[in-house]
Image (tube, grey):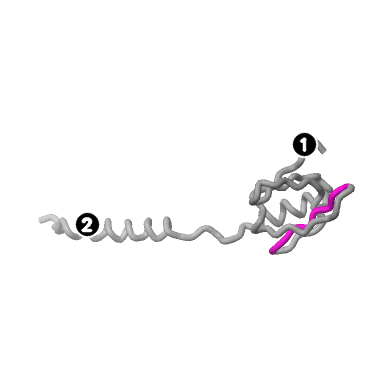
Amino acid sequence: MGIRTSPGASAGRESVRNKNVMSKAKTKAPEQTLEEVKYLRQLIAEGIPVRIRLSSNEEVAGIIEFFDTNFIRVTRDGEPNLFLFKHDIKYLYEDPDA
């Protein structure tokens, strides 16, 4: 005689597998990857001119000289230097015109 298993036994194993798959899929992404820090350090080290678009759709052009967890310092030619809070920044990009 062969070994008999009930239909519920294989279903139990499936549910254990599904739980393992679901627990792996629900892991959170890391809160910070530190790529922002690397990119800002590169911009500072190489003196790359940038354009920064603010939440108010205003644009600021200059060179990033310093950054912190909360703000970025932008040095501009012929205009005052600015401290911009990061929460006011939509995005920034390297200025191809400069």
**Relative to 97, is 18 above or below?**
below
Task: Please tell me how crowded label 1 is: few (under 14), some (14-19), or many (20+) other residues with Cα within 10 Å.
Answer: few
Q: Which residue is mark 2?
A: 11
Find the residue positioned furthest to the right.
78
Mark 2, secondary structure of its residue: helix
Residue 24 counted in the magenta span:
no
Left or right: where 75 falls relative to 88: right
Name the quadrant containing residue 71: bottom right
Residue 73 counted in the magenta span:
yes
Residue at 14% of width from left, 58% of height from top?
6
Mark 1, secondary structure of its residue: loop
Image depth: mark 1 or mark 2 in front: 1
For marks 1 and 2, the one nearer the N-term is 2
Please state which of residues 11 and 90 is positioned toward the viewer in this rendering.
Answer: 90
Q: Main secondary structure of the magenta part?
A: strand
- Amino acid found under the numbered disc labelled 1: Pro
- Specify start and end residues of the magenta stretch as a single range: 70-77
Left or right: where 25 falls relative to 49: left
Q: Position of residue 21 (x, y in %)?
A: 37, 56
Find the residue positioned furthest to the left.
1
Residue at 15% of width from left, 56% of height from top?
7
Left or right: where 6 falls relative to 74: left
Please state which of residues 90 and 9 is positioned toward the viewer in this rendering.
Answer: 90
In space, the residues marked 1 and 2 are separated at their CA atoms by 60 Å
Q: Which residue is mark 1?
A: 96
Name the quadrant containing residue 98: top right
Q: Position of residue 1 (x, y in %)?
A: 10, 56
Task: Please tell me how crowded label 2 is: few (under 14), some (14-19), or many (20+) other residues with Cα within 10 Å.
Answer: few
Q: Position of residue 20 (x, y in %)?
A: 37, 60
